[in-house]
Image (cartoon, rainbow, N blue to C red):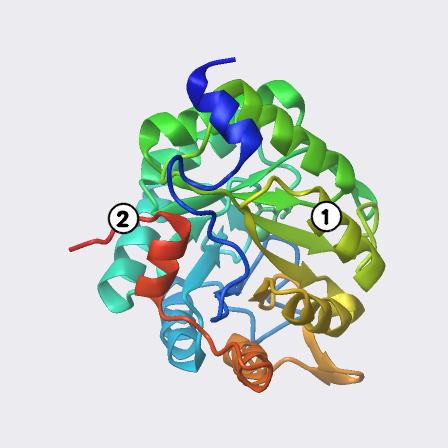
Amino acid sequence: MTPNSTEAARSAGAAGQPARSAAAATLITVAPTGAESEKATVPALPVTLDELVATAAECRAAGAAVIHVHIRDGDARPTLDLGRLKETVQALRESTDLIVQLSTGGAVTDSFEDRLAVLDAAPDACSLTCGTVNFGDEVFANPWPFVRELYARTRSAGVVPEFELFDLGHVATLHRLLSEQGLPHGGHVHCDLVMGVPGGMPGTVAALTAAVAALPEGATWSATGIGRSTLPVLFGALGAGGHLRVGMEDTTSFARGRPVTGNAELVERAAALAALAQRPPMVPDEARALLGVSSRH
Ligand code: KMH
Ligand code: ZN
């Protein structure tokens, strides 16, 4: 174990600094598109660059600080085309001050090679899933050698990872990563609990509490509940001092029998509930300070 990794195992806060834990303000991430829903069945899903940029601006105005990005091709199918990813990063940076977090999860059909190459689009941040999980009828594959390689590349590329945790075993893998390689670029560990995926941990307050208790000391976290677990997870996360991820990647229903009309209404609802909990949304510059993402200027 290197001195850096020893420190990481002890505390996920930056070395020599107090751990940045439960915050007074709420970090809201919007995940507007995902790779699973089809435009034909969900017309409000942003799939073109223009739709994504418009959504990003609306969600920023509603209280989002981070955008978790999956892109689509000309036929609205998920793609990891590097040219399109670079164009998307540039367009989002020009039109908003949101932290741009590219998905390295992609779709379940994407190759490991293409998923690693996402970092070449030079985003501010990326998702990094810490293990394989059944994903409905599919498998979202994240074997240890891939996770280890992706983490090493985030460190050398200077991209801040967000550790996506779909199951308690993924938390164990996060500890293993940190003890082997040390802290991420930016010096701070931030996780996202993705709950309620058929095959992953359930979207319940009991599961959230267990996962949070197992996180590295000093780590911050957000949570999102897929489908009908959206609201239980949102309320549980706010009550437990966590941050929030919302968006049409995770739910396409606003309420029973009422489809989401756009991502902004999901962000607006999260922001209103966070304000009610006396933890109003943080702006992107505050999120940069929390996550260790460097300022663009
Ligand atoms: N689309 C899922 C297979 C991520 O973005 O990093 C993977 C996913 C996770 O959405
Ligand atoms: Zn995603």
Give the left or right position of residue 55, taking residue 211 as reference: left
Residue in view at x 48 percent, y 65 percent: 27
Q: Residue 79 carries which label?
A: none
Q: Residue furthest top?
A: 1
Cα separation between marks 2 and 1? 29 Å
Task: Give coordinates of residue 228: x percent, y percent.
Answer: 79, 70
In front here: 231 or 282? Answer: 282
Task: Give coordinates of residue 86: x percent, y percent.
Answer: 31, 46
Residue 257 appears anywhere in the view: yes
> SS at mark 1?
helix
Q: In which quarter of the image is the C terminus?
A: bottom left
Please say if 94 is above or below 231.
above
**Residue 239, image quadrant:** bottom right
Give the left or right position of residue 182, taking residue 176 as reference: left
Task: Give coordinates of residue 47: x percent, y percent.
Answer: 49, 63
Residue type marked 1? Ala
Mark 1 sits on what residue? 213
Mark 2 sits on what residue? 294
> SS at mark 2?
loop
Please say if 106 is above or below 207.
above
Residue type marked 2? Ser
**Residue 259, image quadrant:** bottom right
Task: Give coordinates of residue 202: x percent, y percent.
Answer: 83, 55
